[in-house]
């Protein structure tokens, strides 16, 4: 008879050393989202994009299973970077992803550093610093980055 466990679905990465050991599952490490370097990288690599390109005749769920990603990652990748699933070009998709990353990145400027330092000196929380900058129409990093 197979045992059935009734705890929440949690990603387990026994090969990782970070995280918290679960008392419910011996010899397993529970991967916590806030643990740095614990969960697999969410971004697609160029080789994964080439795999998607060569497997594009399959369904997104099957492609995702073969490259080790979630189905939604593959579906989103095909929707963003190909007019149709069969017209997907991995090299072009990788260039577009890099351009989006650069376009969305906010550069840390000396003025931005000064604003953050000033807010922290007044013992403001990151939420307060970000909120004040939004009120004044200034660009600001996320509260987690502050």
Image (tube, rainbow, N blue to C red):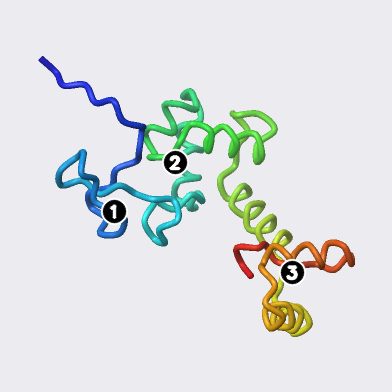
Q: Quadrant of residue 129?
A: bottom right
Question: Is 2 rendered above or below residue 62?
Answer: above
Q: Which mark is residue 129?
A: 3
Most extreme residue toward the left is 1
Q: Is residue 126 left or right of residue 74?
A: right
Q: Earlier in the sequence, mark 3 or mark 2?
A: 2
Question: Is 146 rendered above or below residue 49?
Answer: below
Residue 28 horizontal/vertical position (percent): 21, 46
User: Nearer the observer, disc 3 or disc 2?
Assistant: 3
Depth order, front residue of 108/94: 108
Q: How many marks?
A: 3
Residue 79 horizontal/vertical position (percent): 65, 34
Q: Which residue is mark 1?
A: 20
**Quadrant, the C terminus:** bottom right
> Residue at horizontal 48%, vertical 38%?
52
Under tag 2, what secondary structure?
Answer: helix
Q: Earlier in the sequence, mark 1 or mark 3?
A: 1
Labelled pair 1, 3 in contact (Cβ < 8 Å): no
Labelled pair 2, 1 in contact (Cβ < 8 Å): no
Q: CA distance from mark 2 to mark 1?
A: 33 Å
Q: Which residue is mark 2?
A: 51
> Residue at horizontal 75%, vertical 67%?
140
Depth order, front residue of 34/7: 7
């Amino acid at each position: 008879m197979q045992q059935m466990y009734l705890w929440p679905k949690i990603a387990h990465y026994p090969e990782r050393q970070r995280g918290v050991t679960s008392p419910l599952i011996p010899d397993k490490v529970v991967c916590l989202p806030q643990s740095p370097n614990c969960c697999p990288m969410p971004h697609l690599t160029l080789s994964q994009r080439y795999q998607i390109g060569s497997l594009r005749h399959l369904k997104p769920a099957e492609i995702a299973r073969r490259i080790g990603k979630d189905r939604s990652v593959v579906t989103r990748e095909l929707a963003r970077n190909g007019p149709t699933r069969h017209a997907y070009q991995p090299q072009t998709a990788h260039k577009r992803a890099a351009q989006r990353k650069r376009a969305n990145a906010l550069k840390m400027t000396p003025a931005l550093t000064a604003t953050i330092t000033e807010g922290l000196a007044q013992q403001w929380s990151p939420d307060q610093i970000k909120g004040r900058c939004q009120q004044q129409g200034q660009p600001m990093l996320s509260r987690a980055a502050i």
